[in-house]
Image (cartoon, rainbow, N blue to C red):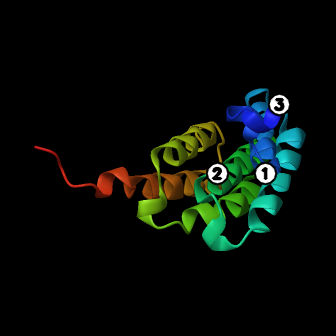
Amino acid sequence: MHEGVGGEFGFDEAREAFCAGSAYLNAGMAQEVEAECERALSLYRAVPAEQRWYAAEASACVDLAAARLLADDIDGAADALAPVFALKPDGRVEGLVKRMGQVRASLASVPSHDAGALADRIEAFSTETATRMLPASH
């Protein structure tokens, strides 16, 4: 029956791991988030680059960074975000930018130079996005 049903029942293993990681993140379960996001990223990266779902892969990186921040690992969070920072502006879709904003907000409560620098990088990343590249409507 599941072969004829779409939605969540049609997710591949990478998407299931990504969604599980997001759910664990909402529950504040850092270790579980990290495990599921690492699994999702491994599965996404096993596919040829031209066939990847880059937005989900990048979002898994952001969730991984958020998990590392839950564990007070700012350097680990920055490492997780490196592939996201490398995205060209036309790949910075709204959902991804929103996720990055949530990470930036969580950095505001961390009193360190590294946290401030990472927050600044996220802010700069968020200023050049796919939607801001669109022509103005009249």
- Give the number of marks: 3
Determine which residue is flagged by label 3. 1
* Cβ–Cβ under 8 Å for marks 1 and 3: no
Answer few, some or many: residues within 10 Å of disc 2's Cα (few below 14, many 20 plus, some between 14 and 19).
some
Instruction: Please state, as top left, top right, bottom left or bottom right, where the N terminus lies in the image.
Output: top right
Residue located 82% across and 62% down the image: 42
Instruction: Please state, as top left, top right, bottom left or bottom right, where the C terminus lies in the image.
Output: top left
In the picture, measured across the screen, residue 76 lies left or right of residue 31, that is left
Give the camera-side residue of 28 and 20.
Answer: 20
Res 22 visible: no
Q: Amino acid at mark 2?
A: Ala
Give the camera-side residue of 128 and 94.
Answer: 94
Q: Secondary structure at mark 2?
A: helix
Residue 45, placed above or below residue 76: below
Q: CA distance from mark 1 to mark 3?
A: 21 Å
Please state which of the two labelled residues, at mark 1 or mark 3, is closer to the viewer.
Answer: 3
> Which residue is at the far top?
27
Give the camera-side residue of 32 and 134.
Answer: 134
Q: Position of residue 28 (x, y in %)?
A: 79, 30
The circle on residue 100 is none
Quadrant of res 107: top right
Determine which residue is flagged by label 2. 56
Residue 17, placed above or below residue 89: above
* Cβ–Cβ under 8 Å for marks 2 and 1: yes
Mark nearer the N terminus (2 vs 3):
3
Q: CA distance from mark 2 to mark 3?
A: 26 Å
Q: Position of residue 50 (x, y in %)?
A: 61, 71
Determine which residue is flagged by label 1. 14
